Amino acid sequence: DRLFDQELPKPLPSEKWWVEHFFQFDADWNLSERPEDCAFHGTIDLLIVDTVTGEVRIFDWKTSREVEPLSELRVNLQLGVSYPFAGCAIARMAGVEPTQVVVGRQYIPVATLQKFNIPLEEVGDAPRKLRARMDAIHGAGEFPPKPGSGCFYCPAIRLCDAAKAAGTASS
């Protein structure tokens, strides 16, 4: 795969690239550029949208030597849910209707590449999955919220009832 050589190639004429691209969604799961509207955010290492085929490709590079099983990556909140949703939203903002989503993760130290496709119907279900995952974590008591200065860095700050109650997140 040309994207996992030592150096990144130049984009093809039909491709739009976003490198280390920060994204954020408001509470209604619309892309937003206003920090005060941010309900969920992240950064995609490399997003490539083919303007001719509609293919959305998301790449993530890791420096870890520990390779996660592919089955775990497919349900990973980052690679399997939020990045594909963000990638498709960014593609649509660029005037491209996504036709398929391909996710790849490269473990640099061990030269291991993992790739998988995400069906578009699963991409559209991302807001429900993200909210369910946050509710499950909160409900299980595994990670009780501790509102404070760290809330600023949390990707779900505007959705967190504890942060709102403590005044560390604006509504």
Image (cartoon, rainbow, N blue to C red):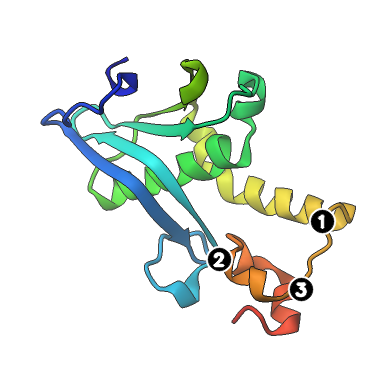
Q: Mark 1 or mark 3, which has the lower sequence index?
A: 1
Q: Is residue 87 left or right of residue 49?
A: right
| Label 1, label 2: how far apart the Cα atoms are | 19 Å
Expressed as whole percent of the image width and height from the top left, the position of residue 117 reads 47, 23
Q: Work out which quarter of the rendered image holds the N terminus and state it.
A: top left
Expressed as whole percent of the image width and height from the top left, the position of residue 92 reads 31, 47
Query: Which residue position is annotated with label 2?
Result: 39
- In the image, 126 versus 64, the foreground residue is 64
Q: Amino acid at mark 1?
A: Phe
Q: Mark 1 or mark 2, which has the lower sequence index?
A: 2
Q: Which mark is residue 132?
A: none
Q: Secondary structure at mark 2?
A: loop
Quarter where residue 3 is shown: top left
61 to 82, vertically: above or below: above
Q: Amino acid at mark 2?
A: Ala
Query: Which residue position is annotated with label 1?
Result: 143
Residue at x-position 50% and y-position 22%: 109
Expressed as whole percent of the image width and height from the top left, the position of residue 68 reads 64, 24
Q: Amino acid at mark 3?
A: Ala
Residue at x-position 44% and y-position 50%: 43
Q: Is residue 96 left or right of residue 31?
A: left
Please indicate, yes or no, whether residue 100 appears anywhere in the rendered image.
yes
Query: Which residue position is annotated with label 3?
Result: 162
Count residues near mark 2 (Cα–Cα under 10 Å), then give few for <14, some for 14-19, many for 20+: many
- Do the numbered discs 1 and 2 sit on residues whose CB atoms are within 8 Å? no
Q: Secondary structure at mark 3?
A: helix
Count residues near mark 1 (Cα–Cα under 10 Å), then give few for <14, some for 14-19, many for 20+: few
Residue at x-position 76% and y-position 73%: 162
Count residues near mark 3 (Cα–Cα under 10 Å), then give few for <14, some for 14-19, many for 20+: some
Q: Work out which quarter of the rendered image holds the C terminus and state it.
A: bottom right
